[in-house]
Image (tube, grey):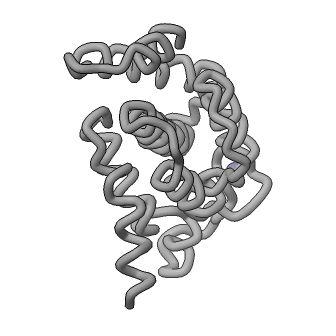
Amino acid sequence: MLTQVQEKFHWSKAVWGRFNIPKHSFILWLAVQHRLKTRDRLSRFNIAEDSACLLCAGAEESGTHLFFECSFSQECLYQMKTWLGWQAHTEALQGLLRWIDRSRRSRFQKKVLAASIASLVYHVWQARNSKLWHSSIISPTLLVQEARWQLKTRITCIMPKQIDQVDKEWFESL
Ligand SMILES: [Zn+2]
């Protein structure tokens, strides 16, 4: 029970971070609890027959696979990390959120990292849905460009007035 509480604690700040776009927070909140209707779950209830990942077709689609074991989403994560200069070795969603929670980066930078994860999870889920419903597929590069543009716009709009010079320069360099 205690571990469950601790688990929840480390991700709740990142999930509901102020820089997150609300609809991104909502999808991330479902994802961390494995409540998205992924194909492994649907096939268990006999709702879907094919449970292959729609983005890479290389494995069964599950939350763990999509965030971020999948070759498609892994490429998105890699591009996002490169953009942010984020050197976390983990590629697992829970691991990334734990990394943010324990990191010694400034509060501002942690909020930006959390928002970037929320955005990635949202956009990967959207890409998966577009493939499912419209058979259209976006490239990881385009997906990350869109996510980056949204993040920059959102955070610039709600930028705190009191911001450390180092954080300001870091954000402006992105
Ligand atoms: Zn995949």
Q: Position of residue 50 (x, y in %)?
A: 64, 64
Q: Is residue 56 visible?
A: yes
**What residue is shown at x 51% (from left), y 55% (from top)?**
102
For the N terminus, the image quarter is: bottom left
Which of the pair 151/9 is nearer the observer? 9
Which of the pair 67/61 is nearer the observer? 67
The tally of labels here is 0
**What residue is shown at x 68% (from left), y 51% (from top)?**
91
> Which corner quadrant of the image does residue 10 belong to?
bottom left
Left or right: residue 96 versus residue 53 is left
Is 50 placed above or below 1 here? above
Is 112 placed above or below 101 here? above
**Most distant residue in the right direction:** 58
Q: Position of residue 35 (x, y in %)?
A: 40, 67
**What residue is shown at x 48% (from left), y 72% (from top)?**
47
Left or right: residue 41 versus residue 33 is right
Which of the pair 10/133 is nearer the observer? 10
**Most distant residue in the bottom direction:** 1
Q: Position of residue 63 (x, y in %)?
A: 55, 62
Q: Is residue 133 visible?
A: no
**What residue is shown at x 56% (from left), y 39% (from top)?**
131
Is 116 placed above or below 47 here? above
